[in-house]
């Protein structure tokens, strides 16, 4: 019998597996639907989009998106040890301090920026050294890029020319301005959550990791989670647990598993003739994501990442772990506040020396560069719902992108700002024709149409098992599922609001904090008493 069963070896699951198994007397089982992270492309930073639509990608699609010309958008998610941290773009960003203060204001004590900063630092090994905001000696290596493309330096110069601040550290006092991103890499290779947290713990005899195991449901005894059922090979198995089941299956997998187990909106469960274990209307609701769009230019000099896969750079990578293959593609970027009403940035930029269109599926023979303006604080909300009761069927994803009218205006403003940056003197010697949206797209109507045609995900779905105390909350501030015992959700799905930035570091922070809460076991008894009283 295991003390803890963790479902999903992604960003959060790897942290939990490591931290919980630090105590040799505690037995931990980690179950992952994907396989081991052996593919070469996982480890070579610039190759990440080559992993899309392969066996280590769940390759989800949204339903037809009404504001995006009814397009069904592709959503890559990691199905492999490390989860999405094994195929992400490696940008290390925490979000704005006010994001976390807001989480706390929403009824989640212990989640203010001052409370979570120690967990960001605990997880981190900042190669620049320790500081008020950064930790060293933690498992997750965070570093500057080894090989920065000259275009990326020119982008930052261009933004400075337009009056934006040059920011050398987005995870410190101020997030605003432009600069080069720091990365979760080590020695020129990706450093996923599996590299950082799981691999060092794999030798422990009290941690068992099973791959290619698809968890199909949570087993309950009344309101108490007592184990999980899963498919392994051709068979079905069950495993029971002594202390807790912890769902870390991500913002799509965790709500799907709760629904499949009879935990969710009673009306939806009845529609599928499923017994209702716990009526929790918020399961699968509150879906938030960052939208983005590619503004692409021809590059007049042969310096983009176009030749990154050619023999010389392959050799340079293999021999010295350096050169263009160490690029995370979106090398530079920044945070801007366009709305005067906002006291935090409302747009993020990702800028790359490459052709980033249709997730990298569409290619070109030209040298190009791309700007990706990104809406940071969307107001629209989507849902994850069951498609069927078959655990192997993907759930229905209604992202409801640009459902709030302000979002399309912000995307249009982002495209205009990308054009201004591209027009700066610092980029003159590189800038060729504008390929997208193209010179014909002038005026707000034309740009709105471009946005509807070309908006894509920036891969940050969160919020579908949100933490809080209101009627739509799924977990409490200790990430225990409301109304049930011995069941937690620990991953990106618990975020009540998407942070203003990339979501990997925040997810790792969540898992670090959850591990401490679980180990301290502070209020488990109190929570169980509350559940008993309520039922
Ligand atoms: C292409 C891409 C680029 C990105 N770029 C960045 C970036 O540059 N910087 C950044 O900060 N963030 C980035 N992100 C986002 C970031 O990686 C995620 O927010 C983060 O990894 C989410 O962690 P998680 O633990 O919630 O989920 P995941 O890491 O997705 O982990 C969930 C795990 O659960 C497993 N699982 C799911 N269902 C089951 C089941 N039924 N049974 C067993 N196992 C199951 C999955 O296979 C997976 O391993 C990117 C994401 C993608 C996809």
Image (tube, helix red, strand yellow):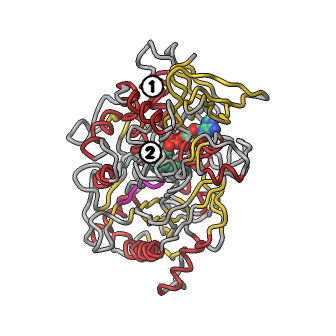
Q: Residue furthest left?
A: 132
Q: Residue at x 47, y 33 (%)?
A: 532
Mark 1 CB in 8 Å range of ligand 1?
no
Residue 412 point in image, percent of width and height: 45, 76
Judging depth in this view, the residue of 226 and 493 nearest the camera is 226
* Quarter where residue 18 is shown: top left
Determine whether 378 is above or below 265 in the image: below
Tell me the quarter of the image containing the N terminus: top right
Q: Residue at x 54, y 30 (%)?
A: 245
| Quadrant in the rendering for residue 186 | top left
In the picture, measured across the screen, residue 233 lies left or right of residue 513, that is right
Q: Is the CB of mark 2 within 8 Å of ligand 1?
A: yes
How crowded is the residue under tag 1: few (<14 C-alpha within 10 Å), some, or many (20+)? many
Give the magenta-colored segment's residue range.
329-334
Marks 2 and 1: CB-CB under 8 Å?
no
Q: Residue 504: which numbered mark, if any?
A: 2
Would you place residue 14 above or below residue 474 in this image? Answer: above
Q: Considering only order in the chain, which callout, 1 or 2, is on the residue closer to the N terminus?
A: 1
Q: Which residue is located at x 34 percent, y 28 percent?
A: 522
Total of numbered circles in the picture?
Answer: 2
Mark 2 burial class by Cα count in 10 Å: few <14, some 14-19, many 20+: many
Is residue 331 a member of the stretch shown in magenta?
Answer: yes
Q: Position of residue 226 (x, y in %)?
A: 58, 26
Q: Is residue 136 visible?
A: yes
Is 174 covered by the magenta stretch?
A: no
Q: Residue at x 46, y 35 (%)?
A: 531
- Residue 292: x %, y % from top left: 49, 64
Q: Which residue is mark 1?
A: 18
Q: Tell me the element at label 1.
A: helix
What is the distance, in whole Å, between disc 2 and disc 1 at their CAs? 17 Å
Is residue 311 visible in the rendered image? The answer is: no
């Amino acid at each position: 019998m295991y003390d803890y069963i963790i479902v999903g070896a992604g960003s959060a699951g790897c942290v939990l597996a490591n931290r919980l198994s630090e105590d040799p007397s505690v037995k931990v089982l980690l179950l992952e639907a994907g396989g081991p992270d052996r593919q070469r492309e996982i480890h070579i930073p610039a190759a990440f989009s080559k992993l899309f639509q392969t066996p280590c990608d769940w390759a989800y699609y949204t339903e037809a998106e009404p504001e995006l010309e009814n397009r069904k958008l592709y959503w890559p998610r990691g199905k492999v040890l490390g989860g999405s941290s094994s195929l992400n773009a490696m940008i290390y960003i925490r979000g704005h301090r006010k994001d976390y203060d807001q989480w706390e204001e929403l009824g989640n004590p212990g989640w203010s920026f001052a409370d979570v900063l120690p967990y960001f630092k605990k997880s981190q090994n900042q190669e620049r050294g320790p500081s008020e905001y950064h930790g060293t000696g933690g498992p997750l290596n965070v570093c500057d890029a080894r090989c920065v493309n000259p275009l990326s330096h020119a982008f930052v110069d261009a933004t400075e020319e337009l009056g934006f601040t040059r920011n050398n550290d987005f995870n410190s006092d101020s997030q605003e301005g432009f600069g080069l991103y720091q990365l979760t890499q080590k020695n020129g290779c990706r450093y996923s959550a599996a590299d950082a947290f799981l691999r060092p713990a794999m030798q422990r005899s009290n941690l068992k990791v099973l791959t290619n195991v698809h968890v199909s449901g949570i087993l309950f005894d009344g309101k108490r989670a007592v184990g999980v059922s899963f498919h392994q090979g051709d068979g079905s198995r069950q495993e029971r647990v002594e202390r807790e089941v912890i769902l870390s299956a991500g913002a799509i997998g965790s709500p799907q598993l709760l629904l499949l187990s009879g935990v969710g909106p009673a009306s939806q469960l009845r529609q599928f003739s499923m017994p209702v274990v716990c009526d929790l209307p918020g399961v699968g609701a509150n879906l938030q994501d960052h939208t983005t769009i590619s503004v692409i230019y021809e590059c007049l000099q042969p310096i983009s990442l176009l030749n990154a896969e050619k023999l010389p750079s392959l050799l340079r990578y293999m021999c010295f772990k350096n050169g263009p293959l160490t690029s995370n593609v979106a090398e530079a970027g920044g945070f801007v506040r366009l709305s005067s009403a906002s006291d935090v940035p409302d747009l993020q930029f990702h800028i790359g020396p490459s052709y980033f269109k249709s997730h990298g599926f569409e290619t070109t023979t030209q040298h190009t560069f791309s700007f990706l303006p990104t809406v940071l604080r969307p107001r629209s909300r989507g849902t994850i719902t069951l498609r069927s009761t078959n655990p192997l069927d993907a759930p229905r994803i209604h992202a409801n992108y640009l459902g709030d009218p302000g979002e399309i205006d912000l995307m249009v403003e982002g495209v205009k700002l990308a054009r201004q940056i591209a027009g700066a003197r610092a980029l003159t010697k590189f800038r060729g024709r504008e390929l997208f949206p193209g010179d014909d797209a002038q005026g707000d109507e034309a740009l709105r149409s471009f946005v509807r045609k070309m908006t894509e995900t920036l891969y940050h779905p969160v919020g579908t098992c949100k933490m809080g105390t209101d009627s739509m909350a799924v977990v409490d501030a200790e990430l225990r599922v409301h109304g049930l015992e011995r069941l937690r959700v620990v991953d990106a799905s618990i975020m009540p609001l998407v942070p203003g930035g990339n979501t990997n570091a925040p997810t790792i922070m969540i898992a670090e904090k959850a591990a401490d809460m679980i180990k301290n076991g502070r209020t488990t008894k109190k929570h169980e008493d509350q559940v008993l009283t309520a039922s």
